[in-house]
Amino acid sequence: MTAFNHQHHRWVYVWVPWAGAFVWCAMLVAMIAVYYAEGANPYSWQTSRVPYISDIGASFLQPLFIAGSTITAVCSVAVLIIERLLWPTGMLDAGLRRREKLFSNLAIFGSVVSGLGLILLSCFNDHFFSPEHYSFLGVFLFGVILSSIVITIKYRWLSHSCPDRRLRMAYFIKATITTVLIILAIVYAACYGTASNVAGILEWVLAFGFTFYLLSFAYDLRLLNNGEASDSDLPSGIEKLEADESSSGLTIQHA
């Protein structure tokens, strides 16, 4: 735990989500750039004019798809584990209650599920392993939705129990990104079988939107950093309770 308490290591925490977001975004840009640089010729397994990420990922660019997905998956899991470890160290004086701890663990579980789904769907391409690919795509989406919802709810609770503007901002960022991505995912699913080109565009929008979801954790980890919060800024619920009890005792004595 010494590494997590050392202020000089704070940049390491913040760069984990930045690294994951950069690798993910760079992979997407490289894939679509190569596709159009080659003339945007549809692959034999491509079912729409607009290529899906999986279509390009099943080409000779699959090694890039696998590498980028693996790094992104590892970073997305690592950032939630780091966040969970930082809360009890006192870097942010806002104590986690049992429900926040439960939801932190659920978020990590969801991230592990989504990470495994992402890695496996990149390995089982939609050309030779179509059923497996789309099954793992479902696993990935389930994990992301579960993790994003529970982490948003957790920050909602924390912003109420510890009324600091930075926690409210963290909640607002998470809630906004999660809501937008879920709405887009619903529209994507509705268009998938009826408007494949629209669904293809939405898939790319969702993928780039996932970049912003990863980046939102950079703000969270800065907030959890020892240099970003102090006891005077963020009084914990326990300290508030003790202060109230002391005030009540003084009132009784004066009476």
Image (cartoon, grey):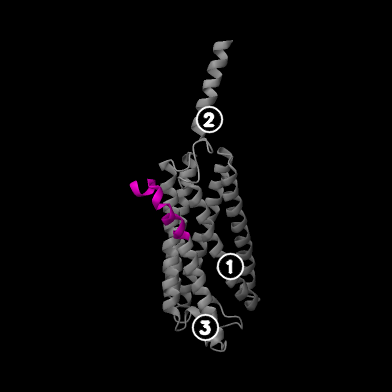
What is the quadrant of residue 250 in the picture? Answer: top right
Query: Considering only vertical position in the picture, is 46 above or below 17?
Result: below
Q: Can you name the residue that lies furthest to the top here?
A: 255
Mark toward the viewer: 1 or 3: 3
Q: Earlier in the sequence, mark 3 or mark 2?
A: 3
Whole-percent x, y for residue 75 in the image: 43, 61
Residue 34 is labelled as: 3
Image location of residue 71, percent across then percent down: 42, 67
Q: Which one is earlier in the sequence, the residue at label 1 or at label 3?
A: 3
Q: Is residue 105 magenta-colored?
A: no
Task: Classify mark 2: helix, strand or loop.
Answer: helix
Q: Secondary structure at mark 1?
A: helix
Q: Which residue is painted at 62% across and 69% down in the image? A: 188
* Residue at 54% across, 57% down: 216
Residue at mark 1: 206
| Residue holding disc 2 | 240
Amino acid at circle 3: Val
Query: Which range is magenta?
Result: 1-17
Chief secondary structure of the magenta portion: helix
Residue 9 to residue 187: above or below: above
Closest to the camera, between mark 1 and mark 2, is 2
Is residue 22 at least partly visible in the picture?
Answer: yes
Q: Amino acid type of disc 1?
A: Leu
What's the mark number on residue 246?
none
